[in-house]
Amino acid sequence: MNLTFCRIGRGRQDAAWTPLISSYLQRIRPYASVQEESPLSEERLWTTLEKRNRAFYLVLLDSRGKQLSSVQFAEHLRSLQDTGHQDLVFCIGPADGFSAASLKRANLLLSFGPMTLPHQMAALVLSEQLYRAFTILAGHPYHSGH
C-alpha cells in the first residue's frame, strides 16, 4: 500500500511538532510506503496527484466528515486493501477549509470531531492514527483496545 500524507499550505515548520509527526510516519514504513506532499494550494495538489496517472483513494480531513473509532478506521483501511486500493491520499486542508470542488473529489471526508484543530495538531493526530491502524491490523500490542 502507498500512502501520501498531504498538508496543504502548511506554512512554517514548528520545531516542536515536526519530529513527532515524522516519527509516526517513519513507524508506518514497515507496513506501507509513505510519501509527504506539501502543496501551497489545492490546485497544486490536484496537479501533483493527476501527474501520477493512476487511481487513488482520497481522504480529506473535514470537521463535517465521518467520525470513526481507531478500530473502525483500521477496518476501513483493511477494506480498502481487500478491494484493491493501493494508493491512498490523506490530506489536511488549507486554513479556510477545502473548496466545494475538492470536497466533491473526496472518497471519504474524515473528522476527528467537530472542533477545529491547528494544522500541526491535526497532522500529528492523523499520523498517529494511521500508525495505530496499521498496528491494529498487524495484531501489534501498540493498541490495547481502548
Image (tube, rainbow, N blue to C red):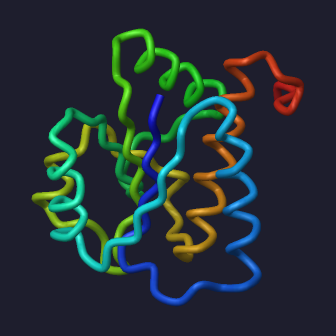
Residue 100 vertical placement versus 41 (above, below): above
Which image quadrant for residue 88?
top left
Residue at (66% x, 85% y) in the render: 14
Q: Residue 28: x, y in percent? A: 66, 40
Residue at left offset 46%, top offset 87%: 11
In terms of depth relative to the viewer, which is nearer, 122 or 40?
Answer: 40
**In the picture shown, does residue 18 fall above or below 135?**
below
Residue occupying the far left of the picture: 101
- Relative to residue 116, is residue 16 drawn left or right? right
User: On the picture, is 82 further left or further right than 133?
Assistant: left
Q: Residue at x 63, y 69 (%)?
A: 121
Choose top left, top right, bottom left or bottom right for residue 79: top left
Find residue 119 and report its horizontal and vertical position in percent: 52, 74
Classify 114 as above or below 118.
Answer: above
Can you say whether 117 is above or below 11 in the image? above
Q: State how many labels appear.
A: 0
Query: What residue appears at the point 42 percent right and 60 percent down from the top-left corner?
Result: 6
Q: Position of residue 104 (x, y in %)?
A: 14, 48
Q: Locate residue 51, reporting x and y percent.
A: 16, 52
Q: Quadrant of residue 59?
A: top left
Q: Quadrant of the C terminus?
A: top right
Q: Tell which residue pokes out farthest to the bottom in this image.
A: 12
